[in-house]
Amino acid sequence: MERALDAEVPASWVTADEVYGGDPALRDWLEDRGVSYVLAVKGTEPLGTATPGRATAAQLAASLAAEQWVACSAGYGAKGRRLYDWARVELAAPAAPEMARWLLVRRRRRDGELAFYACLGPANTSLVGLVRVAGIRWAIEDGFQQAKTEVGLDHYEVRRWPGWYRHITLALLAHTFLVVTRTQAGDHTKGDVAA
């Protein structure tokens, strides 16, 4: 990410799973670079609160009132809309003006299971905006799964960096070609039907 940001690759938001989200150094580094993020964290993750102090993500979620939860879709999945209940808690203010930190909480509707996200972004970011960013990660994971099944992203037997890097690069390039080709074919078909 450092090389990409140094090369001025545009990135409005960064999103990642708990492996990366649970790293306070990564969160601090992104904040220092001025990059907004929605990073999954464990319920035991200690977070700085709006009032001086710290609390775990689960403790903060337990303090949410019923009226703070909003039903919202995080995008489409294989089974349709990913509909969950969402809420957020404001955390300690960041050093940068006009930015804010939140804990975003996702509650599964069928059993109440919670998931947690540490967030940083422009202070005027809506709850729906944070949910949209959280949902993007699923699309990326779906893309990796497609690349594994369609172009053999995970079918390599190399032991050195150059061979692995070439395989991954070519597999992702092939997957990109397939996705673009499918998308263009779908758009073309829709145009013919409408005509």
Image (cartoon, helix red, strand yellow):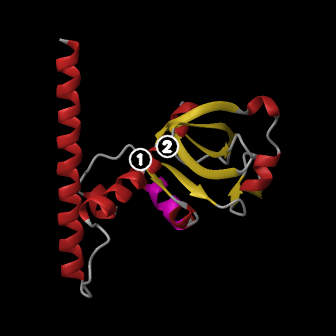
Q: What is the number of callouts on the image? A: 2
Q: Does residue 33 appear to the left or right of 135 in the view shown?
A: left
Where is residue 114? Give x, y as percent.
70, 50
Task: Decide: is 29 above or below 131.
Answer: below
Residue 174 position in % (x across, y down): 18, 57
Tell me the residue that label 2 is attached to.
Answer: 135
Badge 2: how crowded within 10 Å, few (<14), some, or many (20+)?
some
In x, y percent, where is residue 186?
A: 23, 32
Q: Which amino acid does label 2 sit on?
A: Gly
Q: Is residue 89 placed above or below 172 in the rendered structure?
A: above
- Range shown magenta: 25-32
| Residue depicted at 81% across the width and 48% down the height | 62
Q: Quadrant of the C terminus?
A: top left
- SS assignment at label 2: helix
Residue in the image at 26% along x and 83% along y = 157
Q: Is residue 172 left or right of residue 38?
A: left
Q: In which quarter of the image is the N terminus?
A: bottom left
User: Looking at this rendering, what residue extends furthest in the bottom direction?
Assistant: 159
State yes or no: discs 2 and 1 in contact (Cβ < 8 Å). Answer: yes
Q: Residue 154 carries which label?
A: none
Q: Mark 1 points at which residue?
A: 139
Residue 98 sits inside the magenta stretch:
no
Residue 28 in view here: yes
Picture coordinates of residue 181, whole percent (x, y): 17, 42
Considering the whole magenta stretch, tell me its main secondary structure: helix
Q: Nearer the viewer, residue 110 or 129?
A: 110
Judged from this view, the residue extending furthest toward the top is 195
| Quarter-of-image position of residue 65 | top right
Residue at image coords 18%, 34%: 185
